[in-house]
Amino acid sequence: MTSRRIELFVMPGCPVCPQMERLFEQLKQDGQIDELEVIDITRSPERASALGVRSAPSYLVNGALFSGLKTRKDIEDLLQQSTGGKWRSLLSEELSEGGMEAAREAVLKEQAAREALFDLLEDPETPLVVRIGLSAIIEELAEQGSLEPYLPRLLALLDNPDQRIALDGLYYLSMLQAPEAVQALSQIADDDRHPLQQQARELLQEQAESASLH
């Protein structure tokens, strides 16, 4: 059985930290978590910095970092989620609240966070503000050459029944030079019955114009 371990980051003068510490202590007493470590950011700045902690209270729930005031039910839901579910919650929360840098660092460092990114892209319920942040992160992954391993996930987006999601997948594919990506774009561009034919043609044209400038 996986240990349900919590690292809670607090700092002196924080008005919310004592509330979260009491909440986690109660969860431990009730047997819902196995281990709780309370860390003062001012005394352990290296540990906080290494995990990307920028505010208090922040708490590491089995590898995923969250912050701010939450209810007992919020925390219980996080504890019950799979690893992927925790990363999806983290990315959604950070991008919804303007935490672009924290979401970016999570995706760049953690494979599970990258998988969660694609889970969110495939979900029609993912809010627009979250999608915008995810797109910016994907563009950075493409620039670093880290997007090609996820070509199968990108190709899967093309088959999504939600045309908005399929169009996003088409755009992300255009960032790759892999033969499979170019072939997929070309097939759509040549298919008169495909609803995204025109967009695929435009993306291929942009690729050709960009290549001619270099």
Image (cartoon, rainbow, N blue to C red):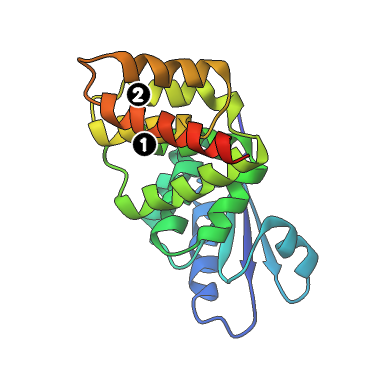
Residue 204 x, y percent position in the rendering: 42, 29
Separation of residues labelled 2 and 1 (CA atoms): 8 Å
Q: Quadrant of residue 44?
A: bottom right
Which residue is at the front of the view, 66 or 211? 211
Circles 2 and 1, Cβ within 8 Å, touching? The answer is no
Amino acid type, label 1: Asp
Secondary structure found at label 1: helix
The residue that mark 1 highlights is: 168
Query: Height in image: 6 above or below 80?
Result: below
Q: Image point 69% across, 56% down: which residue?
A: 51
Mark 1 crowd level (few <14, some 14–19, many ≥20, 10 Å Cα)? some
Compared across the picture, whether 11 is left or right of 170 comes to right
Q: Is residue 110 above or below residue 46?
A: above
Q: What residue type is labelled 2?
A: Leu
Residue at x 27%, y 41% (from the top left corner): 125
The residue that mark 2 highlights is 158
Q: Nearer the viewer, residue 187 or 94?
A: 187
**Quadrant into which the N terminus falls:** top right
